[in-house]
Amino acid sequence: MRALLSVSDKAGIIEFAKGLESQGWEIISTGGTYKKLNEAGVRVIEIDEITKFPECFEGRVKTLNPYVHGGILYKRGDDAHVAQAKELGVEGIDLVCVNLYPFKETIERTEDFDEIIENIDIGGPTMVRSAAKNFNNVLIVTDVNDYDAVLSALKNKEDTLEFRRGLMIKAFEHTAAYDAMIANYMNGRFNDGFGEYQFITGKKSFQTRYGENPHQKGALYEFNSHFSDNFKQVKGEASFNNINDVNGALKIASSFGDENAVCIVKHGNPCGFALRDNLLDSYVEALKCDPISAFGGVVAVNGIVDAPLAEKMNEIFLEVVMAADFTSEALEVFAKKKRLKLFSQGREKLVMAKDSHDFKHVDGGFVYQNSDCICDNEVHNAHKKSELSATKQEMKDLEIAWKVAGLTKSNCVVYVKDSAMVAVGMGMTSRVDAAQCALKKAKEMGLDVSGAAMASEAFFPFRDSIDAAAQAGVKAIIEPGGSIRDDEVIEAANEHGISLYFTTVRHFLH
């Protein structure tokens, strides 16, 4: 039995080679892998001896040879194949262990295109595909984490067809993701990221309890391991909807830097938000906005949850709590709630992966775009359009309202008072309806909107929303501007003594 080992990531390769050698395998290798194994005392055959041809063109051609691919691809159970292999002097290669040139690490490290080109693997993917195609006869190993399992399967004669099939699937996933990464990089560099094809790949993080509904299956896939860094399951098993809600809450809570932000979300929409001197007070204030909707909701905490906060959260039924981290005492408190799911980032404060693009499924395909970004300077650099200026606290309220509005389903209007959301209308077909719905809900909750700041993620097309805000006691408004009736909106703000700011940036979310 012969094994061909040629790896870029050499972690564990010596131990793997020695494990094969101890089971009677003959080891063939290339370049740097050969050198490492040889220095470690592994009896290893250099690839030149198999190909009967030297490595050439600065290593660009090493394994692209019929003695290699013939040895991998011929069918052991086919008499004609066996006879032809014997006639041609092709010996079988029964295990191929390959991982590919570090293209991802190279593009993260340098913009030097010549170096990037040299880190596009050719022979590696070809060997992987050859071995994967002939998985009935050849074991293909592409994952360092599989070395021990392969050695164990060979030792115990458990390298079954099912086991080989699993390795084959991993191999094709490996080469597909690699080629997709190269194509996307080239389109990003030369076609502004929008080539003839767009490849979206992700690594499975975990299976969800079910999909959007119990009869649907679901799983979470991550880009470049970002999500597993930012989303560690501490307690419970999340559903598809839980993850979607956590994502919405996380985006809002994490957008306030080091501040003690707490966001409560239900069905993807915020129903509570507050900033206070400590996280417990932030949660209490956030809950006041809509405690009915918060029942069964998701909470994102921009900080570390301690026992007192956990006790307070346990007073109502919550589906999920996402936090930067939890104290051991908080976890003991939450252990009482069997259905509660907990997720942590293992940090002091929440962070986002900051994906460069996003996409949305439509029937028969998907729409793809640059990710939206709600930057702090949008509020700080907003243009004052009114005669009256906002106070320092009103500017803070405008910032909160603007960020929440921009991360909430359009049409959306958000009211914030003393750094806490007091009303929100979202996902409405009319901006007037969104504004009025929010005020109606605030009245039902017994919340005083007078003195609040208001944000709309897109412009107000008419002055009627400003008139309604004035009637409710709103003192400051922020919106993108850009309506043909902006002058009427500005005039209304001045009539009512409201400070008005235009950001010039719209944030539709559909």
Image (cartoon, helix red, strand yellow):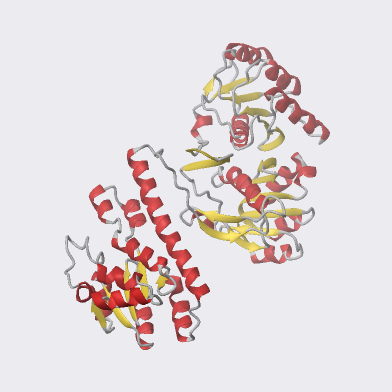
Position of residue 455 measured from the top left corner of the image (x, y, whole percent): 63, 28
Q: Left or right of 419: which side holds 30?
A: left
Position of residue 166 measured from the top left corner of the image (x, y, whole percent): 50, 69
Q: Quadrant of residue 79?
A: bottom left
Position of residue 408 measured from the top left corner of the image (x, y, whole percent): 63, 36
Q: Is residue 278 visible?
A: no
Please give the name of the residue rendered at 32% of the width and 55% of the height, measured from the top-left corner.
Answer: 106
Compared to residue 411, the image places residue 495 above or below, namely: above
Q: Where the N terminus falls, by quadrant?
A: bottom left
Q: Quadrant of residue 497?
A: top right
Position of residue 502 measured from the top left corner of the image (x, y, whole percent): 55, 22
Q: Left or right of 134: which side holds 117?
A: left
Please give the name of the residue rendered at 71% of the width and 51% of the height, measured from the top-left corner.
Answer: 213
Q: Is residue 426 visible?
A: yes
Please give the name of the residue rendered at 18% of the width and 73% of the height, measured from the top-left corner.
Answer: 52
Q: Left or right of 83: which side holds 326?
A: right
